[in-house]
Structures are given as C-alpha cells and as structure tokens.
Amino acid sequence: MREQTPEQIIQQVIDAKLRGRGGAGRLTGEKWRIVRNIDDNQKYVICNAYDADPRAWAARSLLERNPHQVIEGIVLAAYAVGATEAYLFTRNIYLEGVASVQRALNEALETNLVGRDILGTEFSCTINVFGVDIGFMGGEETVQIALIKGRRGMPEQRPPFPAQYGLWDKPTAINCVETLANVPVIVRSGAAEFASVGTEMTGGTKVLTVYDYVPDSEPKVIEVPFGTTLREILHHAGYNRPDSDLRAIVVGGAEGGALPTSLLDTPYDYDPL
C-alpha cells in the first residue's frame, strides 16, 4: 500500500486474470473498479467465507490454514475500492476456522496490518467476523447483506447490484474468500507470474473438494491450476480406478450437474464447463 495506488492494484488484479472463484467467474478487478469509481463517503468489503454446500471445504480450509493471507487479501481489497470497513462472513460451525481467523486478526492488529493508519499510511480498515449457519441460502450475497444489517436472511432482487447499492445502501465489493486469498500473491509476485499459471482466460489455481461416493470415504481438498482436466483432478485426489467403474462426475456440487465419462478430458475452467 505504501508503494502502489489503489488503481495500480486494481489493474494488477485485472492483468493477472483473477476471476471470481465463487462461481460467476467475472474478472475481480473489473468488479472492484465499479466500486472504486462510485463517489461515496463510505464503502464496504464483504469476504464470503460461507461454504453454501456443506460438502465443500474450500472456505473452511483457507480459514483454518491460511488466515493471515485471507486477512491480507481483505485489506488489499478494501484499499483498492476505498472501503474502511470489511466483514468476513462465515459459518459459525467452523469453530477451528473462526478461532484461527480471530487469532490472526489479533496479531494483525498488534502489528498494525489492520486498524488505523495501516503501516504508517493514511489508510484505515477494520474487519468484523460475522458467523451464522442458515443452510444453503447463507452463501447468497444479498442474504449476507440482510443478515449483517440484522434483518431476515432472504434474497433480494437484483439489480441494483451490491457494487452500487449494498450494505447499508452503500457500494459494496463482495468476493469469496478464495478470490481474496489470491490477491496478496498477485501483489507480491506480479500479475505476469500469477497469470503464467492457469489458462489464457483464467489465471491461477482452484481449490477443490473431491468426494468419492463410496461408504466411509473422506473428502479430499486439493489445489490445481485452471486448465487441469477432470481426469487429472480425479487422479490428484487419489481416484485411480478404471473409467468402467465410474458412471458420471458431478461438477459444482448441489448447484452443478453430472457429466458423463466421455467428458473426463474437459479442462476445468469457467468457459469449457
């Protein structure tokens, strides 16, 4: 933050081809620029760390294992869009993950990585942890906004979108925790290096939860570059049985669909899928 302007960080994130890891796949930097360009005295960032599908462990894994990277990503997002307050929205049943984030937040406050005049700059940002457990709908962004405001968790019609009219009717950047966890990597390593991993359209890697539907099997959380084929993903997750033992592969959990084995060599990316 002492070396780059908010616009420079936004452009870096665009050049890195960081697309939202929550499903829509929109370029994160373009979303941030919308919020940045709105003239308002108050803006917000919401980090969506709520795995709507309880079988997906991406958010939970990041909170437990990389809380400092998540916090750094939230602060960088707030700096980029001009927000001074952020919320980390998660499931309160993630006891270890929530405790891990709280410890990391306390350490960040002690070292001035969060709070007032961060690292001697004029930028200040507070982060609030908001934990609930309301099932599948908790992953929807307008539901998250309503709950933070103390209202009933019901989805609202869009437009207007949260980027223009979000929390407390102010411009709000909402990104999933995996998206934000990638931002510190981009700022440290540069857009070109980040974009060198992945595909022409999508830079970086994806955290996936892979289930083998056999009794007593444990889910595998793996990280692979975008463009890795579904067949390779299964191999990385330890599924090494012949295709004849496989009837279909479900991509996207409850919101996804079942693909036949003839599509096992499809690359994992937003456009092919």
Image (cartoon, rainbow, N blue to C red):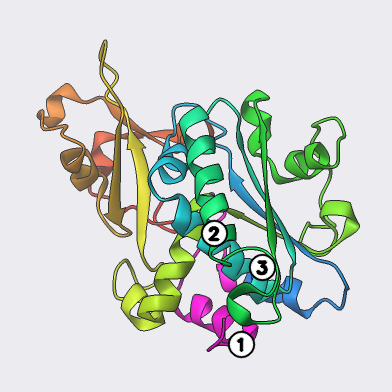
Judge whether residue 221 can be spotted in this image: yes
Q: Quadrant of the N terminus?
A: bottom right
Q: Residue at x 62, y 73 (%)?
A: 118
Q: Quickly name the residue at label 1.
A: 5
Disc 1 element: loop
Q: Nearer the viewer, residue 119 or 96?
A: 119
Which residue is depicted at the point 57% across and 63% down? 26
The image position of residue 137, as x and y in percent, is: 68, 31
Residue 24 counted in the magenta span? yes
Sequence order check, earlier mark of 2 and 1? 1
Comparing labels 2 and 1, the label whose residue is closer to the camera: 2
**Is 133 on the left or on the right of 218, as rendered?**
right
* Mark found first going from the N terminus, 3 or 2: 3
Of the residues shown, which amino acid type is indicated by label 2? Ala
Specify whether 154 is left or right of 184.
right
The segment highlighted magenta reads 1-29
For disc 3, the marked residue is 78
Q: Amino acid at mark 1?
A: Thr
- Going by the numbered disc 3, the residue's amino acid type is Ala
- Pick whichever of labels 3 and 1 is earlier in the sequence: 1
